[in-house]
């Protein structure tokens, strides 16, 4: 991610300032024992709220708290963790009093805004804390029958999936769609997300999903050995999660991990998905429009409609030597008798009896000089899908 650096400052000086700040934060971090909960800039330094990580649960689970106070504290903590930048001086003081923490001051040989820029300072501090993100899309890919394979076959399949991810990313780069994606393995697949946030970032991740599945389908057609390329099922969802940086050796990792409601929902969805199926979770959340700067409420069905317009810009890309004429993505449904189709909404019950609402997604890629690539399952392919259905 690019940050606007202070004008008139040499790149070498910026790098030096980053090292100075990072070393001070590293000392406070104490090998992962402590987290930075909030910060505010000073003329020549920073005021920080630093505490051991158990504070995250102790603050909302202290003995003797009334239910109303538990809810108030949980909301306060969520709002604090969702705050991506610095607090004002007044907000910082109020937060310190609420959490019962004494501010920790670090002195810097430069002014934070002039020596680095506050956005870059926030990004450096983020490695030493935890953030709550409400509006980021995440993909989960799962290799069907993975546990039944030999260890060597498992390695080959994961490598094949990695190649499909890289090939899809390269295709989008050809059209200057530069997704800042991250991934983490589940053992038999990957979680993939866009480090960027907002409507456009989530739409671009949906495009990445389509090209990963297309590359995987073509690789399966070409494979001489059936178990060398995985048969995938996929799930896409938007929801809340915590973003954190694990300890690696004696340092926090340079890349983040996700855990939270969105990853739980995806895991439940993929458990019930059929081989080759693409599921879209039901969501209704606020997302920022990068062009207008406005925050809009976006639901699953509206989101899929939103993805169709950018897909036209991908026409002409080549897949397996044949140019793309059209990419059609839609949610499946049953005919209503007038030649129109509704959208089927399914309810998955997990092992705890909790309900998860999903849609069945279909993607058809039509190529000028090649056979179409059909991704996902049709409505008529779903009798074995263990979920009751209602029609939207």
Image (spheres, rainbow, N blue to C red):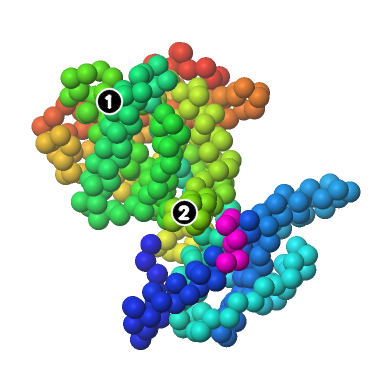
Tell me if residue 369 is in the magenta stretch: no
Q: Give the range drawn in magenta.
A: 27-32
Q: Residue 66 carries which label?
A: none
Q: In which quarter of the image is residue 105?
A: bottom right
Pointer 1 local density, CA inside 10 Å: few below 14, some 14–19, many at least 20? many
- The residue wearing badge 2 is 253
- Count of labels in the image: 2
Tell me if residue 31 is in the magenta stretch: yes
Residue 133 vertical placement versus 39 (above, below): above
- Residue 87 in view (yes/no): no
Q: Which of marks 1 and 2 is nearer the N terminus?
A: 1
Pointer 2 local density, CA inside 10 Å: few below 14, some 14–19, many at least 20? some
Q: Please tell me which residue lies in front, 391 or 137.
A: 137
Q: Name the element at disc 1.
A: loop
Residue name at image x 34 percent, y 78 percent: 12
Q: Where is residue 132 in the image (x, y as percent from the top left)?
A: 58, 53
Q: Please tell me which residue lies in front, 151 or 37.
A: 151
Q: Where is residue 210 in the image (x, y as percent from the top left)?
A: 32, 37
- The residue wearing badge 1 is 229
Residue 287 vertical placement versus 319 (above, below): below
Q: Where is residue 254 in the image (x, y as percent from the top left)?
A: 44, 56
Q: Could you tell me how far apart the alpha carbons at marks 1 and 2 are, in whole angstroms? A: 30 Å
Q: Where is residue 321 in the image (x, y as percent from the top left)?
A: 11, 36
- Residue 291 in view (yes/no): yes
Residue 165 vertical placement versus 247 (above, below): above
Q: Please tell me which residue lies in front, 139 or 342.
A: 139
**Farthest top residue in view:** 383
Residue 187 vertical placement versus 131 (above, below): above
Residue name at image x 31 percent, y 23 percent: 153
Residue name at image x 22 percent, y 18 percent: 225
């Amino acid at each position: 991610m690019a940050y606007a650096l202070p004008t008139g400052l040499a790149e070498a000086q910026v790098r030096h300032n980053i090292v100075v700040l990072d070393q001070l934060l590293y000392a406070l971090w104490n090998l992962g024992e402590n987290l930075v909960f909030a910060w505010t800039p000073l003329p020549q330094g920073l005021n920080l709220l630093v505490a051991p990580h158990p504070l995250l649960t102790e603050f909302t689970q202290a003995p003797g708290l009334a239910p109303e106070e538990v809810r108030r504290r949980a909301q306060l903590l969520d709002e604090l963790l969702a705050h991506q930048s610095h607090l004002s001086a007044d907000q910082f003081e109020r937060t310190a009093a609420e959490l019962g923490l004494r501010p920790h001051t670090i002195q810097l040989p430069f002014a934070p805004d002039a020596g680095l820029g506050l956005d870059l300072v926030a990004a450096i501090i983020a490695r030493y804390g935890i953030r709550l993100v409400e509006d980021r899309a995440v993909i989960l890919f799962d290799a069907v029958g993975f546990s039944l394979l030999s260890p060597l076959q498992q390695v080959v399949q994961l490598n094949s999936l990695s190649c499909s991810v890289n090939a899809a990313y390269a295709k989008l780069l050809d059209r200057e769609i530069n997704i800042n994606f991250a991934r983490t393995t589940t053992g038999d697949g990957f979680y993939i997300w866009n480090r960027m946030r907002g409507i456009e970032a989530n739409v671009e991740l949906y495009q990445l999903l389509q090209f990963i599945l297309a590359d995987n389908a073509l690789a399966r057609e070409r494979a001489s050995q059936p178990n060398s390329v995985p048969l995938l099922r996929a799930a896409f969802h938007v929801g809340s999660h915590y973003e954190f940086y694990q300890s690696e050796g004696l340092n926090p990792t340079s890349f983040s991990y996700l855990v939270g409601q969105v990853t739980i929902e995806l895991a439940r969805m993929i458990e019930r998905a059929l081989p080759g199926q693409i599921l879209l979770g039901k969501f209704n959340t606020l997302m920022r429009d990068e062009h207008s700067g406005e925050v809009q409420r976006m639901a699953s069905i509206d989101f899929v409609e939103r993805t169709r317009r950018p897909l036209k810009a991908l026409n002409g890309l080549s897949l397996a030597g044949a140019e793309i004429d059209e990419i059609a993505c839609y949610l499946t449904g049953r005919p209503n008798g007038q030649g129109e189709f509704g959208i089927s909404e399914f309810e998955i019950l997990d092992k705890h009896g909790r309900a998860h609402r999903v849609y069945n997604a279909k993607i058809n890629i039509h190529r000028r000089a090649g056979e179409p690539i059909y991704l996902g399952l049709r409505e008529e392919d779903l009798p074995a899908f263990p979920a009751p259905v209602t029609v939207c």
